[in-house]
Image (tube, rainbow, N blue to C red):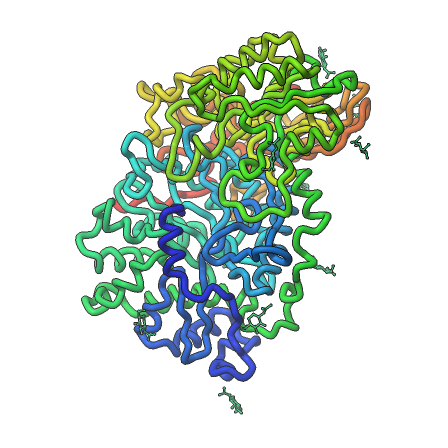
Amino acid sequence: MSILLALSCLALAGPAIAAFPDCTTGPLANNTVCDTSASPVARATALIGLFTLEEKINNTGNTSPGVPRLGLPAYQWWQEALHGVAESPGVIFAETGEYSYATSFPQPILMGAAFDDELINQVATIVSTEARAFNNANRSGLDFWTPNINPFKDPRWGRGQETPGEDPFHLQSYVYNLITGLQGGLDPEYKRIVATCKHYAGYDLENWEGNVRYGFDALISIQDLSEFYTRSFETCARDANVGAFMCSYNAVNGVPSCANSYLLQDILRGHWNWTSDDQWITSDCDAIQNIYEPHYYAPTRELTVADALNAGADLDCGTYYPENLGAAYDEGLFAESTLDRALIRQYASLVKLGYFDPAENQPYRQIGWANVSTPEAEELAYRAAVEGITLIKNDGTLPLSPSIKSLALIGPWANATTQMQGNYYGQPPYLISPLMAAEALNYTVYYSPGPGVDDPTTSSFPAAFAAAQAADAIIYIGGIDTTVEAEAMDRYTLDWPGVQPDFIDQLSQFGKPLVVLQMGGGQVDDSCLLPNTNVNALIWGGYPGQSGGTALMDIIVGNAAPAGRLPTTQYPLDYVYQVAMTDMSLRPSATNPGRTYMWYTGTPIVEFGFGLHYTNFSAELSQPSAPSYDIASLVGACEGVAHLDLCAFESYTVNVTNIGSKVTSDYVALLFVAGEHGPAPIPNKVLAAYDRLHTIAPLSSQQATLNLTLGSLSRVDEYGNRVLYPGEYTLILDVLPQATVSFTLTGEEAYLDYWPQPPA
Ligand SMILES: *[C@@H]1O[C@H](CO)[C@@H](O)[C@H](O)[C@H]1NC(C)=O
Ligand SMILES: *[C@@H]1O[C@H](CO)[C@@H](O)[C@H](O)[C@H]1NC(C)=O
Ligand SMILES: *[C@@H]1O[C@H](CO)[C@@H](O)[C@H](O)[C@H]1NC(C)=O
Ligand SMILES: *[C@@H]1O[C@H](CO)[C@@H](O)[C@H](O)[C@H]1NC(C)=O
Ligand SMILES: *[C@@H]1O[C@H](CO)[C@@H](O)[C@H](O)[C@H]1NC(C)=O
Ligand SMILES: *[C@@H]1O[C@H](CO)[C@@H](O)[C@H](O)[C@H]1NC(C)=O
Ligand SMILES: *[C@@H]1O[C@H](CO)[C@@H](O)[C@H](O)[C@H]1NC(C)=O
Ligand SMILES: *[C@@H]1O[C@H](CO)[C@@H](O)[C@H](O)[C@H]1NC(C)=O
Ligand SMILES: *[C@@H]1O[C@H](CO)[C@@H](O)[C@H](O)[C@H]1NC(C)=O
Ligand SMILES: *[C@@H]1O[C@H](CO)[C@@H](O)[C@H](O)[C@H]1NC(C)=O
């Protein structure tokens, strides 16, 4: 969504009150839509059957006026909840008192770093509970345009912070747990809320060297489309039964996503079997208009809206549908049944949310203010931040020695409050900055903001140096924030912005313990800090949300132990000169060093999955049951499994021992697959499974179970087919490998999934 466009849509917003239709005495009372024994699609079909053509067309934009003569209330389809119920056209926070706040979790990029699917499911459950409370108070609709689940391929992308990271398997696992938490399971009688997987597909550029998201044509090979750009969306549609999708601003291979029937029909509804007529697709905001201009895909406005509607974009976030579908209909450019289908899908989804049912029959209509910002929710927001925070360097300075009594808190994030929420946030119950948290720990604190994130001047140095001089230890908290990475804005450099590197270098010369916190969603190149032995420790803190300061300080002082892992690769500075942001290809070439940890041929500054602890772990990986496997037998054993890629291969047990004697800590077991199999070029390695173990006491062990599927071992051919290839396989446990095991697959290659080919 664009912030500018959000304002224009807001101005058009009709009544935002999310009243329910009156199914008892209203005009609809005797219509099938109010008959709880009928199916959702039958109920919605009966409702839409009452609409005139004009009423249908009037209800095709995100701000639906409803049909007053039928007692069908207006409905705002646009709600946001990226990491908590968020400001958006359909969400109305109160000024004070009840409903003036909701729990504000860390940004997804930091929650992704926790590599803890159970945590994500819990967070999503709380977000949907709070959303229901807002809805019951007429302060929100029931469908939410979250998650942003495009893979964070390029560190320059301004919206990478909204995603869990760069790895497609990680995104799949994360989004499955997120969607089932938000919606309340796979196919509940009543959905908690409807989630929306966005932005389908190939969206990861805002505005780079004149290439603007609204008109960008992403040229994506079918191999990359299948293997990388759409995998999280496959999980949304095929496996997690998400209620809605959003088509993106960009075009894919010449066809704007919202008019792209290959994406919306052949792949999404056809191949992924997202066929239920209570599931709908919205456009990104004004993406329908963008098909006309700046894509210049269709020559008239009428053809533009007809192309999109016929391709399967059911709802227009914007006004192009309501304004132009009437004329398009008069020109015979679409069938009324296509319009009916779009509306039936949307209203059937409201049926599944209990919109037309008596409140007393439903599990979520009793949720109220008492269920918002509960102690459990606030504890979870804190824990999510602690779990994601990632320790990149430590010479033993952390956790801080109890002999340190005074701290200099310096940097543009030292007293961060709103900054900690990143973007797409709501009103939090509170925002605890690092400064507030340090004071609460009773340190004598010398605070000085120093230069701003991208401040080019040094005028703030003297005051900050005085703070540094006065304290026992220095905590520098900076990096990037939404002034340099944001919606509609990509970065041009991976350097620490402004004068921060020079400033930190000067702080490192005070001869005092110096801890640097690198904040923000995208990585910056830390190579100025890593070799500097006077920079004693380095932490990546992302956007840690409402309790971010407490989480960061608790880790610094040792009240909590870090175990997060970087969810993206930290590239060297010159990466941005080696590959254009517009280059969508993953595999290395003369003009591309390769993308993500899977394909990058250079040496990362910090690897994907890296993260240190306050203790040491040893880990043993169980052996494969055999040194070699026959592919035909493996596939033959999958009878009855709907999707061969999800068919079980083997479960591995990882016995993790905390071999330190002092600190209790979590540990994330990451298992990668490598080896010579499948088409060249072979990826460096591929994440196949992960599991986070909690609170492993010193000198004790816990076991993780890592389940591999045939999909974990498969690769994707140039036609996008998922194939199990004969060859050598090595499983690698952890980034600094703790254990490896090898086996071979023999026999003929087997196809696990045939990818639909694009129209000629
Ligand atoms: C619904 O049907 C009942 C029974 O026929 C009738 O009494 C009632 O007036 C009808 N309600 C509406 C809104 O048409
Ligand atoms: C449809 O919307 C237009 C523009 O807001 C309005 O003038 C018209 O009365 C509406 N038609 C119906 C049937 O509600
Ligand atoms: C929400 O709106 C409905 C219909 O207008 C009304 O009956 C109900 O009392 C409202 N609820 C609250 C909590 O304001
Ligand atoms: C497709 O989805 C429907 C439910 O929407 C399900 O009944 C059917 O089994 C699915 N088909 C396949 C091949 O997965
Ligand atoms: C909402 O809060 C009430 C009162 O504390 C509690 O009984 C109920 O279980 C809560 N519901 C949910 C869904 O959390
Ligand atoms: C820290 O931030 C809070 C909230 O913005 C503000 O009230 C407070 O004055 C700031 N503290 C200092 C020392 O600037
Ligand atoms: C900080 O000091 C206050 C007042 O002496 C005390 O109540 C509080 O428990 C202390 N907090 C910590 C974390 O030691
Ligand atoms: C971990 O082990 C290494 C190598 O033995 C040692 O240098 C280091 O101090 C240990 N770290 C912790 C936190 O125990
Ligand atoms: C896990 O490893 C520890 C340390 O080597 C060992 O003592 C323990 O028996 C192992 N546990 C299991 C279940 O293998
Ligand atoms: C792994 O597989 C085992 C055996 O099929 C199952 O019991 C377990 O729940 C699975 N674990 C996960 C994390 O999926």
Where does residue 277 sit, x and y in percent of width and height? 44, 63
Q: Residue at x 49, y 64 (%)?
A: 349
Where ligand 3 lies, by image quadrant? bottom right
Note whether 94 is above or below 54 in the view shown.
above
Q: Is residue 390 left or right of residue 258?
A: right
The one nearer the camera, 403 or 158, is: 403
Q: Residue at x 35, y 19 (%)?
A: 578
Where does residue 596 sit, x and y in percent of width and height? 46, 26
Q: Determine the image quadrant of residue 555.
A: top right
Q: Is residue 367 left or right of residue 58?
A: right
Q: Is residue 280 left or right of residue 591?
A: right
Q: Residue at x 39, y 33 (%)?
A: 717
From this viewpoint, is residue 611 visible?
no
The one nearer the camera, 47 or 104, is: 104
Note whether 121 is above or below 19 in the view shown.
above
Q: How many marks?
A: 0
Where does residue 542 sit, x and y in percent of width and height? 56, 31
From this viewpoint, is residue 707 visible?
yes
Q: Quadrant of the C terminus?
A: top left
Where does residue 363 sit, x and y in percent of width and height? 65, 65
Q: Residue at x 49, y 76 (%)?
A: 33
Note whether 571 is above or below 219 in the view shown.
above
